[in-house]
């Protein structure tokens, strides 16, 4: 691997520069540093920053954390998902499979992110906080970054910046404007049910005009005296631009108030954007991972597991062959995730129509067999490698939605 150079006319050199110290960036740093690469990570925020998130970890995410040898003793274990649609309630355990554990977790992001970036530091990565890093370009190729007055050359720049921003604009990796995205909002509240072992998702939300909202409200018990309460919505719904997330959260709070005995919000509700596409996720000298690559499930807004997996994949490919890593990364991410995520984006146009949404929700929890498939979708347990009924159903849905996609886009609900 490359050696560092003294400051001067020549930039210092690292094998990998990671921009962003969230789960995806930390996973890439851990994996690469443990394999012997010289890694430096930059983040604009201070150490211990709180990233707004639902805090839920799917079994897929727990599996990735196990692969990274992250101790989950600080996380609250979750046995399954409770889905609610109108008066129908189904409480389902996470399935046992050979690919993923049979349990999830809730781990507030301040603690999850700290555990991951601490592991990166322990593996030998250098982490620089409160410093913005921007790619340096040479004829379209990324050759390193400029950060805090330092010029750094790198064999690979890993973009782990979350929702699109300055770095994405520089690299042409912004969201595809015609594709859906999501918005979500959350807060914390005290609840005597903080140790509940099920995530709870209410699939039937309405805005203040009574319009069904394609999205869901959640109660995620953190096991520390608090629950994470939030709601999310897709951009394909009617009047999305005028949707008031605070009002939607207040409405959902009223629905769950008695069952969960929740106290007042412990902090001001905070909202965030969920990117679900990217125009590019690689180029000469760089790759985008996690949310920065649009790797977010449109059907649940979840992306931590994809962030962890894509970060590890980028690192492994770099260690195997730095020259081919970006192209191989894009190919393998596409093979693993693209079909499922494309299906989710097309599905989001479908459920943007209120009548179709109401019918679909009745079906989603109407029978045990369909509810089991919904569970796997909500748990990010489906991708191109998924065997059995769930995989077959999603592949069939992808084919049917491909035919319907032009019509769905032309008749999308008016914003």
Image: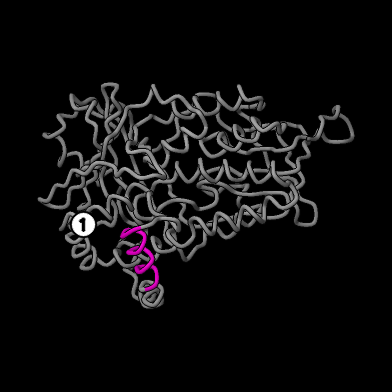
Residue 391 lies in the magenta-colored region: yes
What sort of colour scheme is used for the picture? one colour
Q: Quadrant of the C terminus?
A: bottom left
Residue 270 in view, yes or no: no
Q: Secondary structure at mark 1?
A: helix
Please provide the residue range marked out in magenta: 388-399
Q: Determine the residue positioned at 65% across, 46% down.
A: 317
Give percent across and percent down for residue 137.
76, 50
Residue 20 in view, yes or no: yes
Q: Is residue 297 left or right of residue 353?
A: right
Above or below, 267 relative to 302: above
Q: Determine the residue positioned at 87% across, 36% down.
A: 10
Please name the residue that numbered disc 1 is placed on: 369
Q: Main secondary structure of the magenta part?
A: helix
Q: Quadrant of the N terminus?
A: top right
Q: Is residue 399 left or right of residue 329?
A: left
Give percent across and percent down for residue 310.
54, 46
User: Residue 61 occupies which quadrant of the picture?
Assistant: top left
User: Residue 120 occupies which quadrant of the picture?
Assistant: top right
Q: Determine the residue positioned at 88% across, 30% down.
A: 8
* Mark 1 residue crowding within 10 angstroms, few (<14) / some (14–19) / many (20+): few
| Total residue callouts | 1
Q: Nearer the viewer, residue 83 or 20?
A: 83
Above or below, 73 relative to 376: above
Q: Determine the residue positioned at 20% across, 59% down.
A: 361
Above or below, 371 relative to 257: below
Q: Furthest-right residue in view?
A: 9
Give percent across and percent down for residue 403.
39, 77
User: Residue 122 occupies which quadrant of the picture?
Assistant: top right
Give percent across and percent down for residue 409.
39, 72
Residue 294 lies in the magenta-colored region: no
Q: Is residue 42 left or right of residue 323?
A: left
């Amino acid at each position: 691997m490359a050696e560092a150079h003294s400051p001067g006319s020549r930039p210092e050199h690292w094998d990998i520069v990671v921009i962003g110290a969230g789960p995806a960036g930390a996973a890439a740093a851990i994996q690469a540093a443990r394999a012997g690469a010289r890694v430096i990570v930059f983040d604009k925020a201070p150490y211990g920053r709180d990233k707004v998130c639902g805090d839920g970890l799917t079994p897929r995410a727990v599996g990735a954390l196990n692969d990274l040898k992250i101790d989950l003793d600080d996380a609250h274990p979750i046995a399954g998902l409770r889905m609610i649609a109108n008066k129908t309630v189904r409480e389902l355990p996470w399935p046992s499979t050979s690919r993923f554990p049979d349990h999830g977790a809730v781990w507030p992001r301040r603690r999850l992110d700290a555990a991951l970036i601490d592991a990166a530091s322990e593996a030998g990565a250098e982490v620089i906080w409160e410093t913005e890093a921007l790619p340096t370009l040479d004829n379209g190729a990324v050759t390193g970054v400029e950060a805090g007055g330092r010029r750094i050359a790198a064999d690979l720049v890993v973009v782990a910046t979350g929702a699109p921003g300055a770095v994405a604009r520089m690299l042409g990796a912004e969201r595809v404007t015609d594709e859906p995205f999501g918005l979500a909002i959350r807060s914390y509240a005290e609840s005597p049910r903080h140790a509940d072992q099920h995530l709870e998702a209410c699939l039937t939300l309405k805005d203040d005009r009574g319009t069904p909202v394609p999205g869901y409200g959640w109660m995620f018990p953190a096991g520390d005296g608090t629950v994470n309460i939030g709601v999310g919505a897709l951009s394909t719904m009617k009047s999305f631009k005028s949707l008031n997330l605070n009002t939607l959260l207040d409405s959902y709070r009223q629905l769950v108030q008695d069952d969960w005995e929740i106290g007042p919000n412990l902090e001001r509700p905070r909202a965030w954007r969920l990117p679900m596409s990217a125009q590019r996720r690689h180029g000469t000298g760089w790759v985008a991972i996690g949310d920065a690559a649009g790797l977010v499930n449109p059907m649940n807004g979840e992306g931590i597991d994809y962030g962890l997996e894509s970060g590890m994949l980028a690192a492994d490919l770099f260690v195997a062959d730095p020259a081919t890593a970006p192209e191989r990364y894009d190919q393998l991410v596409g093979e693993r995730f693209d079909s499922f995520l494309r299906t989710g984006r097309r599905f989001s146009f479908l459920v943007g129509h209120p009548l179709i949404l109401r019918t679909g929700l009745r079906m989603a929890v109407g029978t045990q067999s369909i509810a089991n498939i919904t569970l796997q979708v909500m748990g990010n347990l489906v991708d191109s490698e998924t065997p059995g009924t769930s995989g077959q159903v999603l592949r069939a849905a992808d084919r049917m939605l491909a035919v319907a996609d032009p019509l769905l886009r032309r008749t999308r609900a008016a914003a």
